[in-house]
Amino acid sequence: MSPDPPVNRPGLFIALEGPEGAGKSSQVVRLAQRLRDEGVDPLVTREPGGSPAGDRVRAVLLDPSLRLEPLSELLLYAAARAQHVAELIAPALGAGRLVLTDRFSAATVAYQGYGRRLDLDFVEALNERVTLGHRPDLTVLLDLQPHLGLERVAARGATDRLERAALDFHQRVRDGFLAQSRDDPGGWAVIGADDDPDAVAHAVWAAVAPRLREWAGR
Ligand SMILES: Nc1ncnc2c1ncn2[C@@H]1O[C@H](COP(=O)(O)OP(=O)(O)OP(=O)(O)O)[C@@H](O)[C@H]1O
Ligand SMILES: [Mg+2]
């Protein structure tokens, strides 16, 4: 199924996605710096969170002491995203800014759809509603075998609620990201995240630079 065209707006919307510990947060920092070097001032944000209310929802979602029903988990992510889009993302894109987010709606399809096995059509309909139709112009998938990413986050210290889920859950999440990239090859760039951070940053930039040129020359 080919997606509808995204809503018309002057900004450029880039999402970094991938399983636990793939290096999203590290690469967002590097990409943001590279963009600034190119004279672009990105709005850098993350999910869940990105707004004061969303950050409170984030705390619930990641708290390892809480047990959440898959449906509650989905709705909390959706609530945080609705707030994030309305408060931050849509206004910034409307004002012509480049928005760079650490995770977005594809993560919900991967985690709650493929990982928790909630109905994919429902997850996608909810995404469409809470994003107000804003889809990333480019989703950069940092792809990594789940056990490698989980080793990285375990080495980082305390683990959160999602990181503690079973390995087969994380395998379905990875498969869910890859399936989405196959469904929309023009909108996704898949990058192997097991290389060293400099090599990954280089590949991320190679995916982003043509979009940036297109956007700047529009
Ligand atoms: N290419 C890499 N090679 C080895 N280690 C890496 C690489 N990229 C990041 N790391 C390390 O792996 C850990 C996880 O990285 P990071 O926090 O950027 O990943 P993430 O995808 O944002 O994780 P999370 O899913 O938990 O948000 C950090 O300790 C980071 O220093
Ligand atoms: Mg991160």
Image (tube, rainbow, N blue to C red):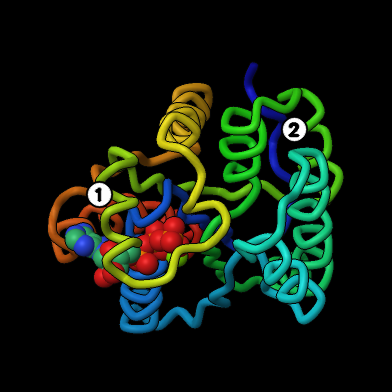
* Quarter of the render that holds ligand 2: bottom left
Judge: label 1 CB < 8 Å from ligand 1.
yes
Q: Which mark is residue 124?
A: 2
Left or right: 140, with 37 as reference point: right
For the N terminus, give its image quadrant.
Answer: top right
Residue drawn at (66%, 25%) of the image = 117
Q: Residue at x 27, y 54 (%)?
A: 151
Residue 12, image quadrant:
bottom right
Mark 1 element type: loop
**Which residue type carries mark 1?**
Ala
Location of the C terminus (image quadrant): bottom right
Q: Nearer the viewer, residue 154 or 193?
A: 154
The residue that disc 1 covers is 193
Q: Is residue 125 left or right of residue 118?
A: right
* Residue at figure coordinates x 32%, y 71% from the top left: 156
Find residue 213 and report its horizontal and vertical position in percent: 39, 59
